[in-house]
Amino acid sequence: METVTLAAPGGDHSIWALFWQAGWVVKLVMLGLIAASIWTWAIIVDKIIAYKRMDVSLNRFEQVFWSGQSLEELYRTLADRKTTGMGAVFVSAMREWKKSFEKGAKSPIGLQTRIDKAMDLAITREMEGLEGRLGYLASIGSAAPFIGLFGTVVGIMTSFQAIAGSQSTNLAVVAPGIAEALLATALGLLAAIPAVIAYNKLSADAGKLAARMEGFSDEFSAILSRQIDEKVMPRAAAA
Amino acid sequence: MKAGLTTSVAMHVVLIGAGLISLSSPRPLESSNFESFPVEMVPLAEVSQSVQGERTAPVSETPAPEPTTEEAPVDNAQNIGDNQVDLPNSATVPGNRPVDTASAPPPAEEPPVPEPVQEPEPEPQPEPEPTPPPPAEEAEAEPEPAPVEEATPEPAEEPAIAEEQPRELVQLPTSAPRPQTRPQPQQQVAERPEPQREPERPTPEPQQAQQPSEESEFNADEIAALLNRDQAQGGGAERSSEQASLGGRQTTGAVLSQSEIDSLRSQVSRCWNPPVGAADAENMIVSIRLKLDPSGALDGNPEVVSGGGSTMAERAAADAARRAVMRCAPFNAPADKYEAWADVQFNFDPSQMF
C-alpha cells in the first residue's frame, strides 16, 4: 500500500507572511517604500493645511487692504507681527519705502526699483515655504515605481533560483516567491500614485498662490509708484 | 510639518492594520483535484477477443475460435457462435462445483426432466430422490464415471473410438456452445456400455449404467431440450471462418477492476479483527482461499493456503482471518464477472496494521 501525502505548501499567504518570507533586499525595498509613502502623505497633509491657511490669510489681507484703511496704519499694525503671504510682501515694501523716504531719497527711480526688489524677495521667500517639499513628492512619484520594480526583480530572481534548487515547477512552489516579489511593486505604486497626483495638484495650487501674490505686488508697486511721484518729485523739484 | 507627519503615520498604521486583517490569507481557489486524461473510444471486442480461440486446438500465430457454420452475419455481434442472437459465451467456471449448474441451467435440469416421466418404472425410483438435492454433482458425475468404466473394458473392441470418447467427454463441460456435439457422445455412451455391463456387473448397474439407458429412451425430447437451451445459452452471433487455434474460450471482461478489488478488500477488512499484541507480525500473514457462489456466499469452507503455523499466535491469526471471511460471507461483487471472483485468495497481513 502506497501512501501519498500531499504536503500543503505554506498555509498562510497573508501580506504579513509574504513580507516576512521575503529576502532582505526585498524587505529593505519594501520598508523604504513604506517610509516614502509615510513621508509623501506627511508632505501632502502639511501642504494642504499650509495652502488652506495661506489662502485664508490672503483673502483676509485683501479684504483689509482694500477696505480703505490708511497704509501707514496698516503697516503699524502688521510690522510687529509675524506676517505671511501678502502681509509679508506689504510689510517688506513698506519697510523699504520708509527707510528710503524718511531718510530723504533723492532718486524716485532707485526707490521704485528697491521696493520692487524687496517685494520680489518677500514673494520668493513665501513661495519657498509653500513649495518647500514638493520636490520630494516629485521624486517619490517618479522613483518609487522603479524602486518597487527593483524589489520585484530581485525577489523573482531569488525565487527562481530557489525553484531551480527545488527542481519542481509546481505552481505552489513558484507562486509564493512571485507573490512576495510583486508585493514590492505594489508598495512602490502605492507610494508613487498619491505622490504624483498630489505633486501636480499642490504645485498648481502653489502657482495660483504665487500668481495672487505677484498680482498684489504689482498693484502695490503701482500704488507706491504713484506715491513716489506725488511726494518725492515735488521735494526734488523744491530742492 | 509635525501635524502632517503624525497624520500620515497614523493613517498608514490604520491602513496597514486594516490591510493585514482584510487582505490576510486570501481564500484558496476551490479547484477540485482531478486529473484530466484523454478519453479514447477503443472497440472492446478487439481487445477482449484478441486471445479467443479453442482450448484444444493447435497453436498458431493468432488464436482463433472454431469456425462457425451459420453464414448469415448478424450486426454488432461480438461473441462468436452460431446463434441468431448475440449472447455471451457460457461461463467455464474452474473446478467442479454445484455452483456451475446453478448458473448454467441446462446441465442441472437435465436429469429431472426425463426422470419424472420414468416414474412408472420400478427401477429408477430410488434415483430421483437422491438426485434432485445434489443435482449438479450427479450431472457432472454422469459423464465422468462412464468413460472410466468404458475405458477398462473397451480397448479390445474399439481402441480408436475409446480414446476419442474420453477426450470429447472431458471437453464437454469446458466448451460452451455444444448443440451438436453434446448429445452425440451421450448416445454413444448409452449404446455401448449396455451390451458390456449387463453380463459383467449386474449389481452396480441400477445406479450408474442404467441412467444412460434411460436417457437413450427419451433421446428425441432430450436432444430437443438440449438444443433449445444450449443455443440460448452458449455462443454469440458473430461468424468466424478462420481455422481454430489455441486460445481462451471465454475472454470477455472477466477481470475485476481495481475498484472492485478494493471493494472486496474493504468488505473483508471491515470484518477482520487483526490479532493484536503478538510478536513477529511477519509470520502471521495468512492467505485464505475461498470459493464463492454467484450470490457471493461462501461455497465450502475457506481454505488456509499459507500461514496459520505452529505457534498459538499464528494459529490465532489464521482463525481470525477465517472468521473475518466467514463473517462477511455474502460478498458484494459484480455478478457478471463471477468467473473472476469465483475463486479468490485473500492475504491477511497484520504487519500493515501497525
Image (cartoon, rainbow, N blue to C red):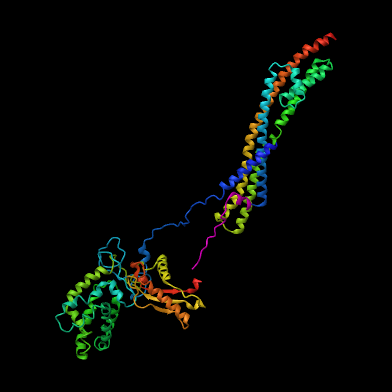
User: Which sits in the foreground, A54 or B134?
Assistant: A54
- Regarding residue B113, the answer to whether it shows in the image is yes
Answer whether residue A5 is magenta in the image.
yes
Residue A37 visible to an observer of this rendering = no
Image spot of residue B237 (x, y percent): 28, 65
Relative to B87, is A186 above or below?
above
Question: What residue range appears in magenta?
Answer: A1-21
Q: Which residue is nearer to you in this view: B293 or B71? A: B293
Q: How many marks?
A: 0
Going by the image, does B199 lie left or right of A204? left
Q: Who is closer to the viewer here, A201 or A55?
A: A55
Is A31 left, or right, of A113 in this rendering? left
Magenta stretch prevailing secondary structure: loop
Q: Quadrant of residue B263?
A: bottom left
The residue most toward the right is A239
A216 within the magenta span = no
Question: Residue lying farthest bottom?
Answer: B200
Residue B86, how many percent across, how many down? 28, 64
Residue lying at the far top of the rendered structure: A238
Quarter of the N terminus of chain B within the rendering: top right
Q: Can you give x and y, in whole percent of width and height, for residue A70 in the image?
A: 73, 16
The part of the image, by quadrant, that contains residue B271 is bottom left
In this picture, residue B142 sits left or right of residue B5: left
Q: Residue furthest left?
A: B120
Q: Please tell me whether residue B61 is drawn above or below residue A79 in the rendered image.
A: below
| Residue A74 sits above or below residue B246 on the image | above
Of residue B62 and residue B152, the one placed in the foreground of this image is B152
Image coords of residue B186 (percent x, y): 23, 79
